[in-house]
Amino acid sequence: MQAERGDTIQISVSGDSGGHWWLTFLGSHWELAEEENIGHKGVCQVIIPPEIAWRLLTQGITIEEARPQIEIKGKTTLGEPIFLARAVMV
């Protein structure tokens, strides 16, 4: 994945139970925020339906099943790692 300092990925889970998060590359690491930082440049947007988001993050769906249902706009190479993301929900 090739990112430049200030590159920002917007991750959106659509629907009433969804939300928006921004991942910004700061040169040596990525920072997650719940609000957009106007000073950074949005280079990629990942849009995930809510029924796919929880299944993807908990390994309840395969990458192959999820891929056609997730929209990645812009610099797609920065959005592709979403398919490897995992979460623990309590």
Image (cartoon, grey):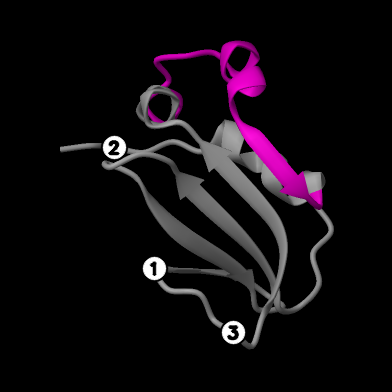
Nearer to us of marks 3 and 1 is 3
Q: Which mark is residue 34?
A: 1
* SS for callout 1: loop
Q: Where residue 18 sits in the image (x, y, percent)?
A: 34, 45
Nearer to us of marks 1 and 2 is 1
Q: Amino acid at mark 3?
A: Ile
Which range is magenta? 56-75
Q: Which quadrant holds residue 2?
A: bottom right
Q: Residue at x 35, y 29 (%)?
A: 54
Judging depth in this view, the residue of 81 and 35 nearest the camera is 35
Q: Which mark is residue 88?
A: 2
Judging depth in this view, the residue of 46 and 30 nearest the camera is 46
Q: CA distance from mark 3 to mark 1?
A: 13 Å
- Mark 3, residue position: 38
Judging depth in this view, the residue of 75 and 60 nearest the camera is 75
* SS for callout 3: loop
Q: CA distance from mark 1 to mark 2?
A: 19 Å
Is-magenta flag for residue 64? yes
- Relative placement, left or right, of 2 versus 68 is right
- Relative placement, left or right, of 36 versus 34 is right
* SS for callout 2: loop
Sort mark 1 into few (<14), some (14-19) or many (20+) by Cα contacts within 10 Å.
Answer: few
